[in-house]
Amino acid sequence: MEIINIRVMNGPNYWSIRRHKLIVMKLDLQELEDYPTNKIPGFKDRLTKLFPSLYDHHCSEGKPGGFLHRVDEGTWMGHVIEHMALELQTLAGMDVGFGRTRETSEKGVYNVVFTYMEAEAGIYTAKATVRIAQALVDGKDYDLAQDIQNLREIREEYRLGPSTGSIVEEAIGRGIPYIRLNRHSLVQLGYGVNQKRVQATVASTTSSIAVEIACDKEETKNLLEKAEIPVPKGVIGYDEEDLRAAIKKIGYPIVTKPVNGNHGKGATTNLRNWDDALKGLAAAKKYGRAVIIEKYIVGYDHRILVINYKFVAAAKRTPASVYGNGKSTIRELIDLVNTDPRRGYGHEKVLTAIKIDDFTMGILQEKNLTLDTVLPAGEELWLKPTANLSTGGTATDISDLVHPDNVFMCERIARIIGLDICGIDIMTPDLSQPINEVGGAILEVNAAPGFRMHLAPTDGLPRNVAEPVINMLYPVGSSARIPIIAVTGTNGKTTTTRLIAHIVKQVGYKVGFTTTDGIYIQNQMMMRGDCTGPVSAQFVLKDPTVEFAVLETARGGILRAGLGFDHCDIGIVTNVQPDHLGLMGIDTIEQLSRVKGVIPESVWPSGYAILNADDDLVYKMRNELECKVAFFSMDEKNPRIVEHLAGGGLAAVAENGFVTICKGNWKIRVDKINSIPLTFGGKATFNVQNILPAVLACHLRGFKIEDIKAALENFVPSPATTPGRMNLFQFKNFQVLVDYAHNYAGLEQLSKFVEKIDGSPKVGVIAGVGDRRDEDIVELGRVAARTFDEIVIRQDKNLRGRSSEEIIGLMMQGIKDVGGNKKTTIIPSEPEAIDYVIREGQKGAFITICSDVVPDVLEMIMRHKEQEDNVEA
């Protein structure tokens, strides 16, 4: 078997609108295509021995054992790999359940699709399960445990921590989108101008001064002490001399910890002699030169969580420990504790497995114990100096038991430090009594406190501590989103997108938009190139100045990674034409329509899909939608429009020379078609098709008709406003039109405009695209022959898998089918082809240059125009 490619979906996609996280592996079964599972001796036995839990997979039979029954009957290896991929991730602590396997048009080649939790783990799983399948086919042993452990480590390396993860999950539950900004814990909640950020449990609302104070333990202690908050007596020390002086002043037992520390790093507690104090000093100095030396307070370790200056939760923490039974060694007791199903690797479960480390060995040495010592029955042994859950500690929720005086004190502490998300460590015998009455003290105030002990305590009631964080970031009535209009289709996407963005900007929004020529924020180009995929969409949505997003969304990005957003408010489909067929597994126009249909399917139920009623495939999309639907048409008498309006629907049509919005039986005439510069006096009918959905979308957003009309009339096609879309240059003796038309459907639309232009001869500079079907390249030649008196064939720099001779031969075939001996010149270099048509341009000629490298061509044309103007001057 051979993996052809692996694609990672992370948004609504061709395979599923609701399941965003999918691995799509294109797999060639090779000779195994002829060997379903029932033809491989012993395969099922080896499979069930390695994966006994596959019995729980229902598959299409809908009952336990259903998948294995399919294996008995005979199923193909891609299907088996799909189920193994789901089970392998589940065994590694990532519970996933959706998968499907589909044939492609290539014999023996399948798309194996399955969900993932972490992309890197999903990619590893795809490769591992192919290896496993091959081993099962060959009858070889396989170390599945190693793959499971590798996946656990990958998961822990890339996943969000439990605290950040809980905030993200709470946001998702409220319909708030998120974007992970790095591979660590920096996350954006919301879009554009309404975004907030969290990193671990520090929010964009958190004061940097407060974080700095909390990280300086001595400064924190000074502020609290001055505010009459009980804190342990202590000093700052740097060396053994300072340590000796501190002990003389405050006496044993002591605690040592770095001044700039958190999460218990470098802290050692209950030091009762000089040798232990030296070790504690050394441990703290690993994290900084300055060390806090303070009195050890007797009691239990407690954590209070305060969010938005309100008490939220409290937990009693206990270090990792074992209880003796009079029979087992300490090592055996640790192993026994780790068999608790609640303990796991890293953060995968409620509790973390206890590891034997230097701290453990130091404690044992101090007590004259070894790992082989048998602990007396009933004796408790703490194995760590601190009670952190990440080192195997436990937590008990006591939120309902905290004395009101302690609640008030903790809320006051948060205000004193200025932390809106604050973890307060308290040592006291009992939090149900005021700590100043029982000898307790505040040990630390923590920025970025961990939530895990509250979300999933070992004992007691779990607390949704992420909820008050989201309440703080997004109070009732505030929005996390910005309006999104997404535009897709074969032709007309860019012009429609630019026109909508222009209208939106005219109305007063700060707009960000993506197109095939770049990313723009308020008409300022941020990035040049084809920017119609999910990365470009998220570039706009991550920009904190953007109030409104208009996103051109092409086929390629949807197939490579899905959409860059979860929902849009309005989704527009301009048309579906047979372009890009045979690429990325899309072989028919019906499949291409399904790809384009991802956009309207991602519209909110309260939003609108705007569909082309003149296009059969686009019109058919309405049947799959949960949102509202509006249509546009070049013919107000189109039966589909008539039926829709009779039911009280909404549409935009071209009628009696006007762009008109129809609501049921009512008409709102927006503007005369001839008055809109984009139509070139009504000659560019294909641009009317682009104007209709743009106008309808803006009307649906509540824009005034007079504002839409004004924007239509001041949107003048030019290299600046519509680069490469109907850019007309007037030379002294001829005209030059530059357009992006790159497929035969686009050229057919352009042809209707060229026919209406006075000019002779009509010259066309065209090129075939190597990754299109033979019939598409031939048809491009036919359309060119019907449109132009003279044709110049150039070549793209990237021939996309074909030879220049092959592409030219197919185009010439189409030209000869229509034009016979029509004058045709072959100039492979695009710059040379442009120089040729301008140099040889006849008086009165109309020259059309079709190019997909728009900036370069426009620069060349303007240079020629400038040279002509200089000569005349």
Image (spheres, helix red, strand yellow):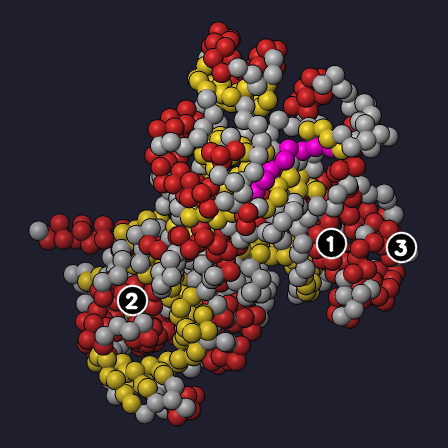
Q: Residues within 10 Å of mark 3 (few under 14, many from 20)?
A: few
Q: Marks 2 and 3, Cα distance to the nearest angstrom?
A: 62 Å
The residue positioned 30% from the left and 63% from the top of the image is 501
Question: Secondary structure beneath disc 2?
Answer: helix
Cβ–Cβ under 8 Å for marks 2 and 1: no
Closest to the observer, 330 or 221: 221
- Which of the numbered marks, if any, corresponds to residue 499? 2
Which SS does the magenta portion mostly show?
strand
Please state the horizontal and vertical placement of residue 166, each as a whole percent of the image. Answer: 53, 50
Q: Which numbered disc, 2 or 3, marks the residue closer to the eye?
A: 3
Q: Would you say residue 319 sits in the magenta stretch?
A: yes
Identify whether 814 is placed above or below 668: above
Q: In the picture provided, is 322 more to the left or to the right than 188?
A: right
The residue positioned 39% from the left and 56% from the top of the image is 474
- Give the residues drawn in magenta, as a range: 315-322
Question: Secondary structure beneath disc 1?
Answer: helix
> Badge 1 is on which residue?
87
Question: Secondary structure beneath disc 3?
Answer: helix
Identify whether 727 is placed above or below 696: above
> Badge 3 is on which residue?
45
Closest to the observer, 292 or 300: 300
Q: What residue type is disc 1 on?
A: Glu
Tell me if I can see residue 86 in this picture: yes
Q: Residues within 10 Å of mark 1 (few under 14, many from 20)?
A: many
The residue positioned 68% from the left and 28% from the top of the image is 383
Q: In the picture provided, is 206 more to the left or to the right than 19?
A: left
Q: Marks 3 and 1, Cα distance to the nearest angstrom?
A: 17 Å
Residue 479, image quadrant: bottom left
Identify whether 483 is placed above or below 522: below
Residue 235, image quadrant: top left
Please state the horizontal and vertical placement of residue 132, each as a whole percent of the image. Answer: 78, 48
The residue positioned 41% from the left and 91% from the top of the image is 647
